[in-house]
Image (spheres, rainbow, N blue to C red):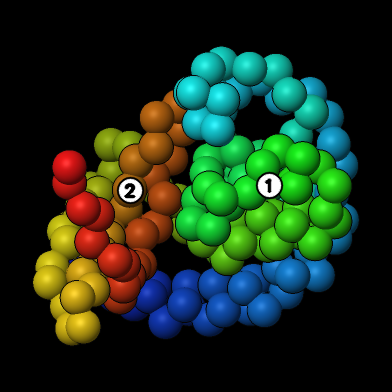
Amino acid sequence: MKYAIWAILWPLLFLIGLAFRILSPLAVCFVTRAPYLTTVKRLDSKLTLLNRDRLVWWLTWFDTDDNATDEYWYGVYDATSTWTQADYDNSKFIRWYCRMMWLQRNSAYTFNRKFFGIAKNSWLRWQYKTIKPFLFGKVNDINIGWKEHSGQNKLLYAGRILGLRTPKVEG
């Protein structure tokens, strides 16, 4: 039964995620900058107080409730690893890109937790997470069910059936 409930929600949450992804390039134009104490990967994972970008209050449904909107930059994702802090500070486009990519990566995150999150002790709780080989040297990073994040009192709906990635090279 718990798997059926998850499956019934999947099409609805897929469409909600799609709508949020389409609107996120515009949403990230509305940010406010404020001090935020967090562990910053870009600064050797040190706990640091920085002025960080968050979406304005009326767009928080788009945002991640457990990270700033500019986490794509400070978390060192993808192409950002080759840019400098000066590149980020001096380029409105790079700042927009990093905020937008964070929301693409975490589409409808707060909305999802608020309306579709479940209690940690819920009978609906389950998660299947695995990485399977795929075509053309890619892997499929699957994460379905309800996932837990430290410091959060609700589990977040996880619906990543297809998550193509380049495998990490050890060494």
Residue 161: image location, x then y, percent: 28, 73
Left or right, residue 106 beside residue 50: left
For residue 30, what is the image quadrant?
Answer: bottom right
Task: Return the residue nearer the eye: 71 or 3.
Answer: 71
Q: Amino acid at mark 2?
A: Lys
Q: Earlier in the sequence, mark 2 or mark 1?
A: 1
Q: Quadrant of the N terminus?
A: bottom left
Q: Residue at x 23, y 61 (%)?
A: 167
Disc 2 element: strand
Report if residue 62 is visible in the image.
no
Mark 2 vs 1: CB contact within 8 A: no
Tell me the residue that label 2 is attached to: 147
Q: Residue at x 74, y 57 (%)?
A: 94
Residue 64: image location, x then y, percent: 60, 47
Report if residue 131 is visible in the image.
yes
Q: Residue at x 49, y 57 (%)?
A: 78
Left or right, residue 139 beside residue 113: left
User: Would you call the spot at circle 1 few (<14 residues within 10 Å), some (14-19), or many (20 or more)?
Assistant: many
Report how far apart the C-alphas of labels 2 and 1 lie in the structure.
20 Å
Q: Amino acid at mark 1?
A: Thr
For residue 37, what is the image quadrant?
Answer: top right
Tell me the residue that label 1 is attached to: 69
Disc 1 element: loop
In the displayed structure, would residue 13 be above or below residue 94?
Answer: below
Figure label count: 2
For residue 10, what is the image quadrant?
Answer: bottom left
Residue 80: image location, x then y, percent: 58, 52
Left or right, residue 87 beside residue 40: right
Task: Return the residue nearer the eye: 61 or 143.
Answer: 143
